Amino acid sequence: MVSSIAENAYNAQNPRVLETEAVESLVERFVDAAERAQKAGFDGVELHGSHGYLIQEFMSPRNNHRDDRYGGNFEARMRFPTEIVEGVRNAIDDAFALSFRLSAEEFVDGGLTDVLETHWSVRTNAKLHNFWAFRAFIDRLACTAEEFGITVEVRTEAWTSQTCPNCGSTEDTTRHQDTLTCTCGFEGHADLAASETFLRRHQNSESSDWRTRHNVSRQRHEEVARPMARPMCLK
């Protein structure tokens, strides 16, 4: 469906070539499907851009031999998935989760390869590597803690990055890059605010709950949990 190729790496059928108008229609169908999922009560959707499916075929230099704006160099091959992501993101609420499954290696001759090192931005690479580094850290911590009879529990940080530390609202906040603002007047570093919210939520002491912080000066409150995003040195 992407382009006419002599050999399909994933099945024996030779795909037909989609007209440009048909590709544009497919973008709209992806967006419509995401909107239906949200209206049906789901928490999010995942775009499947891997394992030889349609989106990956557009990204793949092996499969995509198109000569219109959806084929050619890497930027053109990425246009189809990019338009889908942008369309879905604009159509759904900010609270609705959107993920993208991507094969960084196709493991076929002439296929997509070295995505992390070659094509993605430094910032994206850093976030991915930090995620896997965190998982490795948790696994090692759990192994070490087990020797002392300690159980490691990973608690979710869902919604903490959108929660105002002053009023507790998630509906009236706006996050732009590293800044979190709220209609109540709060403005601060998004990650530090999320860390503080997370700590308050999971502390046992009722006196340190975020509700006790409403309209209370941060400097005058001694028992409140402090942000955990701070420099440290392990020796």
Image: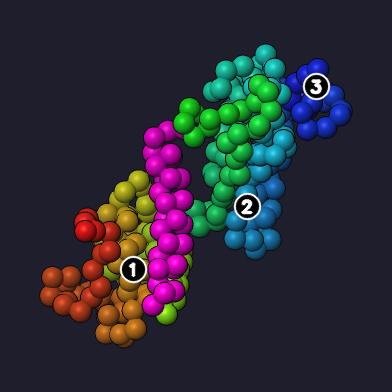
* Image quarter of the N terminus: top right
Q: CA distance from mark 2 to mark 1?
A: 26 Å
**Is residue 112 highlighted in magenta?**
no
Q: Amino acid at mark 3?
A: Glu
Pointer 3: what residue? 7
Closer-to-camera residue (231/107): 107
Q: Residue at x 57, y 48 (%)?
A: 99
Q: Residue at x 27, y 54 (%)?
A: 189
Quadrant assignment, res 216 = bottom left
Magenta segment, which residues? 120-148
Pointer 1: what residue? 197
Pointer 2: what residue? 45
Closer-to-camera residue (176/107): 107
Quadrant assignment, res 73 = top right
Residue 78 in picture, x, y percent from top left: 58, 28
Closer-to-camera residue (121/117): 117
Numbered badge on residue 91: none
Say if residue 9 shows up in the picture: yes
Label 1: few (<14), some or many (≥20) within 10 Å?
Answer: many
Quadrant assignment, res 62 = top right
Residue 182 in picture, x, y percent from top left: 32, 59
